[in-house]
Image (spheres, grey):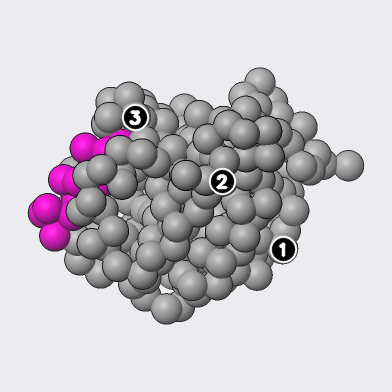
Amino acid sequence: MATTDGGAKAPRALVVHGGWDGHEPRQCAERFAGWMTKRGFAVTVKDSLDAYLDPAAMKDLAVVVPVWTMGTITGDQRKALCAAVAGGVGLAGWHGGMCDAFRNDTEYQFMTGGQWVAHPGGVVPYRVDGIDQICPLTAGLKPFNMVSEQYYMHTDPSNRVLAWTTFSGEHGNCPWVEGCRMPVAWLRRWGQGRVFYTSLGHINRDFDVPEAFEIVKRGIQWAAGQPVVPEFTSP
């Protein structure tokens, strides 16, 4: 049994990567698996959705980190994942790796709290603002800029939104999004489980932006039921 240096049982994390290679699932999985290991998690990395089918292993997890864009999940795989989260396992992810995973599975989308619809203009400059200074997941972070896909999403109104972005309408052939204020990060509950999501992180390099990396790190800790330990605050 994996333990921390203090002898306590280490929180167990499952990272599952695959799907569309354009989102660099393996590279992103390696980045966060490495960070979680340093933070004291016992991390298992899998490249198959069958990882969700072992009920004993799933029940023992603190958090699942899905990095799987598009593709198809079977009914049994989705039921096993949803049941684990409802039973208290955390879920934390980003961009298309969590909220553009299984486009035809509405139960999965209810759990995650949102679904990708479009990214007008492709990779564009945009700003993340309206950052919640009360929630420990975002406290101390100031508005920041990204050059990436700015996700337009359908989101659940029950989400607690932590950060926002506004579409300029000046990129792509989508004038209807001009002025639209869209959630960038949120948290929610699914049964007893904690769920965190951010639309940041199109490719691994996007997490070189300190704020983007920090939001996900804090989200994983929160979803796992661990103390949120900030590693970066905006200067």
Give whichever of discs 3 and 1 has the lower sequence position: 3
Q: Residue at x 41, y 31 (%)?
A: 194
Residue 2 locus on image (x, y percent): 52, 45
The part of the chain drawn in magenta is 74-85
Residue where numbered disc 2 is placed: 41
Which structural element holds mark 1?
helix
- Label 2, secondary structure: give it: loop
Indicate whether 218 appears above or below 139. below
Q: Position of residue 218 (x, y in %)?
A: 62, 39
The answer to which of marks 2 and 1 sits earlier in the sequence is 2
Viewer-nearest residue: 5 or 137: 5
Residue highlighted by disc 1? 208
Amino acid on which the number 2 mark rests in the picture: Phe
Let me know if residue 223 appears in the view. Answer: yes
Q: Looking at the image, which residue is at 65% across and 70% down?
A: 205
Q: Which mark is residue 88?
A: 3
Q: Amino acid at mark 3?
A: Gly
- Pick the front one: 112 or 85: 85
Q: Residues within 10 Å of mark 1 (few under 14, many from 20)?
A: few
For marks 2 and 3, give the one nearer the viewer.
Answer: 2
Quote the CA–CA distance across marks 2 and 1: 22 Å
How far apart in space, not on screen, are marks 3 and 1 (Cα)? 31 Å
